[in-house]
Image (cartoon, rainbow, N blue to C red):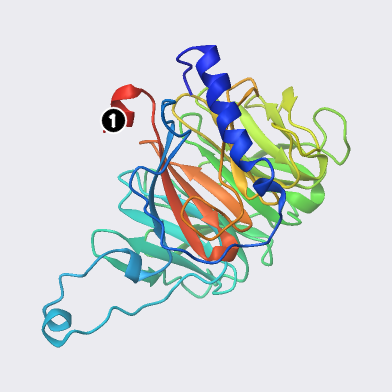
Amino acid sequence: MKETGSSGWKHALALTCMGIALAGLVGCAAEPVKKTETAGLVWPMPPEQPRIRFLAEYRSEGDLGPKNDLRATLLGEKKTGIALDKPYGVTASADGKRIYVTDTRLRAIMVFDLDRREVRPLRTDAHGALYNPLEIRLDRRGRLYVSDSERNEVLVLSPEGKTLQALGKPESIGRPTGLALDETRNRLYVTDTIRHRVLVYDMDGKFLFDFGERGADPGQFNYPVNLAVDREGRILVTDTGNFRVQVFDQEGKYLNTFGRLGDSYGSFSRPKGVAVDADNNIYVIDAAFNNFQIFDRDGKLLLFVGRAGREPGTFWIPTAIFIDSSDRVYVVDSMNARVQVFQYIKDKKGADE
């Protein structure tokens, strides 16, 4: 987030922290569902300049609005369809019209088609059968990359669900979890959680190299989970067991670290998903605090968003986060069985709109 003055950011952060410091530490205790007015739901609250705005939440077809269906209109049929059960990963098309969500309980990729106002599972071929799909990413050619922790592979699927490649067996991946695409530099990054490393492929699936080993020193990992690539090509890895985010260059050379174990601002308890917006701000999900924290490129804390609950803008064990090219922020709210969508607001004009 570009600063409009350091004092303004400090004030915004202080206001946000006062409201969630205790609520963010209550773990998995969810609040009763209440009807919440989402118009104008922003962080931080006025009079500070808003930086994050709530847009929508998606569980099933019922969240996509009425379908242009004459039969349903005439007969008064209610919309039915598959709902999310235990989502884990999320990605979206460049225009935001299709949202892809992995669901570990359904063992499927659920496609939220906002144009057609329908939710459907992506039908995969026999070789592409999913057992425990976790993270998911979409490239410019429409190919989907899915990490499957039971298959110990990363599947590359066509837009229609046909298996194009299965990566990881020759490299003996133990548990592929996080995925990050860097199409500018022709790279695919994969976290191997139980072998405490990151594997690097080119976009054609050729294995290039890996980096990392178990430990607590700089450049070492203790159960890394998710990762992202910023606009400069830096690799950001949530080193979950070490309660930190580590930063590497595109060749895997260690650069720096931010975060630590604790319950103070900027610390972590169970860091998971990580993503980067157009201004190179870093968003980190914390599944224990039920929020995401936003840092600048150097790891300085800017803002908290969320607390434990079931209302819009609250979370119950969030797992993954994805930010598209329009700075829409997609957060998987796992135990609430939904994906929440937010908008990063760059300036005053965007806040007014």
In the image, what residue type sits under mark 1?
Asp
Left or right position of 348 against 184: left
Q: Position of residue 244 (x, y in %)?
A: 75, 35
Q: Is residue 141 above or below residue 325?
A: below
Disc 1 packing (10 Å; few <14; some 14–19; many ≥20): few
Split into 4 quadrants, where in the image is the C terminus? top left
Q: Residue at x 79, y 33 (%)?
A: 260
Left or right position of 8 against 308: left
Q: Position of residue 81 (x, y in %)?
A: 36, 78
Q: Residue at x 55, y 66 (%)?
A: 32
Q: Is residue 207 visible?
A: no
Residue in the foreground of this view, choosing between 183 and 11: 11
Residue in the foreground of this view, choosing between 20 and 193: 20
Q: Residue at x 56, y 72 (%)?
A: 107
Q: Which residue is mark 1?
A: 352
Q: Position of residue 233 (x, y in %)?
A: 55, 26
Which of the 4 image quadrants contains residue 21?
Answer: top right
Q: Is residue 145 above or below residue 112?
A: above
Please state the total of marks drawn on the protein image: 1
Q: Position of residue 326 (x, y in %)?
A: 35, 36
Q: Residue at x 39, y 69 (%)?
A: 60
Which of the 4 image quadrants contains residue 72?
Answer: bottom left
Q: Is residue 320 visible?
A: yes
Q: Is residue 125 above or below residue 253?
A: below
Left or right position of 183 against 187: left
Q: Is residue 160 above or below residue 92?
A: below
Q: Secondary structure at mark 1?
A: helix
Residue in the foreground of this view, choosing between 251 and 15: 15
